[in-house]
Image (cartoon, helix red, strand yellow):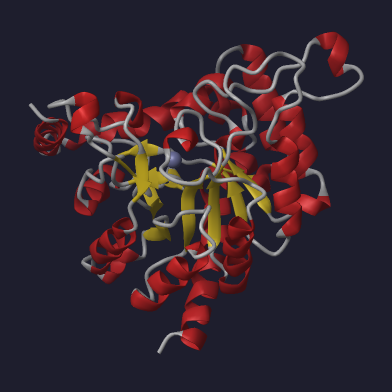
Amino acid sequence: MSLHVRASIAFVMWALALTLPLTAQQSAADEFNDSHFHLTNYVQEGIDVHQFLQIMGRRVSRSTLFGIPLQQQWSYANSGEFAPTYYLQSDAPLYYYSFTDAYIASLYRGLSKEEQARFDPMITGFNPADMYAVDHIKRVLRTFPGVFTGIGEFSIHKEFVSSKVSGETASLTNPALDRVLDFAAEAGLVVILHSDIDMPFAKVDAEPVYLSQMKALLRRHPKTTIIWAHMGLGRVVHPVQTSAAVAAERSPAQVGIVEAMVSDPAFAHVSFDISWDEVAKYAVASPESIARVVTVLNRYPDRFLFGTDTVAPAGPEPYYAVFNMWAPVWKQLTPEASLKVRKTNYERLFDEGRRRVRAWERANVR
Ligand SMILES: [Zn+2]
């Protein structure tokens, strides 16, 4: 049975469950806005936006809406009859699949006005190593005015992925990326940028390899609204670790790095999303890690956004699992911090993005 068919069956079973008495499915309303959501996967398949609306129900008010800019090639020479649906399932390369933007726009346009108001579609189908990337973004805005709020999630350094992408490897120092971020500032596009802070399996006390390039990039674009996805972490790009001896003199660990950035006025335009179950696993790993995360979120509640980073979830269970993993943190946040991280930071950033991108379109699209 294909993944797709399995997903469809799971969805039908879940839809049937909705006919159960209300008490069996009762849950809180307006729990969060989702700042990081993929409707489709690495082979451009996923769930319909109406299925996602049913999953959101009343628990999720609003969500970002994007696919994945990369398509995993099915290379017969590599995997024969086996059709890979994930980047770890094949040695064949990934390539940029720009049609994703037209696909997302067409789904959005098929929604009612009330349904549209719940989504912030994002442009992702560009190659950030291409000096023409910015022209793709402008073309999408001109072709589909009134739809998009931002760009991303797109990736520069991503464990196991960057090295598989066809063509030139993306870099934080590439002027092509500067052109994209300059235009995002001009048009008011909210940027969701994935770039690992470090290499996979880095050693304790090692300087995170990509941090200084990332900081330099962010400093070059003070007028761009940027959300650094997953706080720079990955599945095996674990939080930066520092031994007690070294911590005393230099290189703080992950939470210290993030705290130094949110307290530095040079990064006032930068927020962090805490999306992905791989990130949640670090946060809730121990009472100490929970306390560290709670402290920084309570201290700088305006700078963090919750997101699920789920990819085409088959039903409510996998979708809400990420939110539930954070329960120990939600419990200890102040009511103010909790509300901001779950909801109002999203509203502040994405409402402003919507407003500014519509203004750019009015001035530049005819
Ligand atoms: Zn993602």
Q: Is residue 107 left or right of residue 268?
A: left
Query: Which residue occupies the foreground of this view, 263 or 230?
Result: 230
The residue lying furthest to the right in this view is: 249
Measuring from the top left, give residue 7's x and y in whole percent: 16, 34
- The answer to whether residue 191 is seen in the rendering is yes
**Which residue is located at x 57 percent, y 69 percent?**
188
Does 246 appear above or below 35? above
Query: Which residue occupies the foreground of this view, 20 or 257?
Result: 257
Query: Which residue occupies the foreground of this view, 198 or 362?
Result: 198
**Which residue is located at x 52 percent, y 80 percent?**
359
The total of numbered circles placed on residues is: 0
Q: Is residue 169 left or right of residue 3?
A: right
Q: Quadrant of ligand 1?
A: top left
* Quadrant including the C terminus: bottom left
* Quadrant including the N terminus: top left
**Which residue is located at x 80 percent, y 37 percent?**
260
Measuring from the top left, give residue 193's x and y in whole percent: 55, 48
Residue 144 lies in quadrant: bottom left
Query: Which residue occupies the foreground of this view, 290 or 252?
Result: 252
Does 283 appear above or below 96? above
The residue lying furthest to the bottom in this view is: 366
- The answer to whether residue 24 is seen in the rendering is no
Measuring from the top left, give residue 34's x and y in whole percent: 43, 46
Measuring from the top left, give residue 157's x and y in whole percent: 56, 38
